[in-house]
Amino acid sequence: MLVGDAAHGIHPIAGQGYNLGVRDIAALVEVLVEAKRLGLDLGAADALERYAQWRRADNLTMVGATDLLNRLFSNDIAPLRLVRDLGLAAVHRTPTLRRFFARHAMGLVGDLPKLIRGERL
């Protein structure tokens, strides 16, 4: 099983690999603490599968988003540049959109581990 940067093959845009890694570790710790409390084998496939399923959606979303951003900003085709500039202008002028993207970039959305939410295990 891989966690952190070893588990992700994403573009290093905006340090999102690090952010994914931190959420991965927090989720794995939570799953292992829960398994220990239940007296389960910490290396049992079902406990580790719970971790893998939990993290799958966040990881796939971030991989897709970073790939899209990389392709969008490394391309100089005029129509694509226009769409990119219009999108950036819309985000810049709309506080709701700015908050939406900022919360996603910080990893503050979705099914977050307790440690990320500042809760005790």
Image: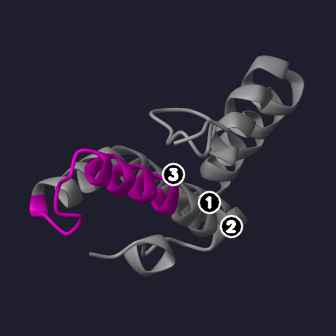
Residue 40 lies in the magenta-colored region: yes
- Can you tell which mark lies on residue 37? none
Q: Position of residue 51 (x, y in %)?
A: 29, 53
Quarter of the picture containing the N terminus is: bottom left
Q: Earlier in the sequence, mark 2 or mark 3?
A: 2
- Residue that mark 1 sits on: 19
Query: Please, which colouring scheme is shown?
Result: one colour
Q: Amino acid at mark 2?
A: Gly
Task: Tell me whether the residue at label 2 lies in contact with that at label 1, contact meaning CB atoms closer than 8 angstroms.
Answer: yes
Residue 76 makes an appearance in the image: no
Q: Amino acid at mark 1?
A: Asn
Q: Secondary structure at mark 3?
A: helix
- Residue that mark 2 sits on: 15
Q: Amino acid at mark 3?
A: Ala
Residue lying furthest right in this view?
Answer: 93
Front label number (1 vs 3): 1
Task: Tell me whether the residue at label 2 lies in contact with that at label 3, contact meaning CB atoms closer than 8 angstroms.
Answer: no
Q: Which residues are magenta?
A: 24-45
Q: Secondary structure at mark 2?
A: helix
In the image, what residue occupies the spot 86% across and 32% down? 92
